[in-house]
Image (spheres, rainbow, N blue to C red):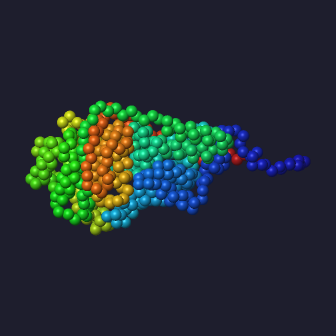
Amino acid sequence: MSTAVSRTPVSSAAARPADPALRRDLPALEAPGFTRPVMPLWLALLGAVGAGIALDAGFPDKGWWPLTLVGVAIVLTALIGRRWGSALLIGFVAGVSFWGVHIFWLTLYLGPVPWLGLAIFEGGYFALGALLIALVYRRAEAAWPSRARRLTVLPLVVAGLWVLREGINSIAPYGGFSWGRVAMSQSESPYTGLIAWVGMAGLSFVLVWLVAFLVQLVREDGLRSSTRVLAACVAIAATLAVPAWPAVTSGTARIGAVQGNSNAGLFAVHERGDILSDHVSASAGLIGQDMDVVVWPENSSDIDPTQFTYASQTLDAVSAELGDVPLVVGTIQARGDKVYNTSLLWQNGGVTDFYDKRHPVPFAEWMPNREFFRALAPDLVDLVTRDYEFGDTDLTFDINGLIAGISICFDITDDAVMRAMSAEGAQVVLAQTNNADFGQTDENLQQLAIARLRAVEFGTSVVNISTVGHSEIIAPDGSTIASIPAYEAGSMVADVPLATAATPASVAGFQLEWLFAGFGIIGLLVALTSGAGASARTRKRPRRP
């Protein structure tokens, strides 16, 4: 005897497991918006190009700081739902686009090959960071099943991975390239003051977290528009509401600085001693001023005064003419078979202290793996005729009781160098640089922006003095005390506030950086583990009738 069985089609809704726990086992089926790309690949690649340009537009010379956040938002949105191949491609395109625009000043004297090579290399770093972020986005539903967890945890993880990539990029390889970080676009934004609390890495973290949170707010289903707007406003207000660090200063030092407007570029043609003469002439404007110290830029004495009588007698004469004031002068020194980019404290007829640059720039001031790279581009490699040594001197001068931190050019970008300088008790930072190789490009302004952020980060006045500009004396709150127009010979003098207390960023900056990066590392591990677990459970689940 047979029994007729009615076979009614099962709707897709009825086929879904009713148990929320079982639903979480099927993230790809239950939440397609979290595992599928938001935009087609061709549009994501176009967006990546635009994102790179927008990222750069927040930096000087344009200084449209909100556009850097827009660029971050485009990158994150383009990475949602991507598999590893397309994520790498999108990240690489965005990275090359950003770096290609951001360091275009390299082409002025060195041509397109070094510029393109560095942009491509940095684009590779950007691509690896993008891959990690894309992996987290694909597994977010499995790792953090509830909306509240995704809104709370996912932005922290994304921001942590962004900071992790910036941090590694800043130290490796060959000492890293600590330029172009998101925080460095904010030297004149409402977020500038935040850097004194959380440091350079922390400022990048907060800004990327904000963007990632806003992106996630848009992605989440089931939220009222009013709730989204309210949450976005609260997040923005919270990041802006942090009060400025009350930089503690006591007393002032009267500091003069001289910009010689010298033809001091790598390929400049001039007689030995011309750069020294330019700075002697520009110092005339300080005669009659009662000063504690006068600062000249990097390489301002193109003759080593410890080796040549002419240079030493010249510095003695300048010091005497200005009232026996100590001079801080940049020069190049050869000691045995080693060469150093050095800053000298010249007083009482000789050198009483010196500082050797801690962070010579790879491929410019020293050539790593010279034979290997020479085989690829001998003409370019041979332009780097000498390899500067990495300095190991202390980072401060005691100038008649004034503790002055000394930074030479790229040193100002190195977090570890600046923290060590603060730990030595620097009351003011004398940042010497030579920007003559970059002409009227925005490299000078990018470096000045970094100096401004460092002043706020460490609560310390910064005297940023260049051979050609932009030269400024910057207060601990980031404001300009005095300046010299770019590409004009001149001098400036001001009563500069002296720092007496460390900022939170200077005390805990290293620990904070690892904390922020740790969010990314731990979150990535959780996401990968959760994603693998969900896939395994899906494979093992028995078929249901």
Pick the residue in front: 449 or 278. Answer: 278
Residue 108 seen anywhere in this rendered image of the structure: yes
Q: Is residue 210 above or below residue 37?
A: above
Q: Residue furthest front?
A: 288
Q: Position of residue 238 (x, y in %)?
A: 52, 36
Q: Residue 25, located in which quarter of the rendered image?
A: top right
Pick the residue in front: 430 or 258. Answer: 258
Q: Position of residue 361 (x, y in %)?
A: 30, 54
How many numbered callouts? 0
Q: Position of residue 253 (x, y in %)?
A: 25, 37
In the displayed structure image, the side of residue 322 where residue 104 appears, left or right:
right
Which residue lies at the image location 57% right of the left edge and 40% below the top edge? 233
In the displayed structure image, the side of residue 477 where residue 72 appears, left or right:
right
Which residue lies at the image location 52% right of the left edge and 43% below the top edge? 210
Pick the residue in front: 187 or 531. Answer: 187
Which residue lies at the image location 61% right of the left edge and 47% below the top edge? 219
Q: Is residue 110 above or below residue 466?
A: below
Q: Residue 362, located in which quarter of the rendered image?
A: bottom left
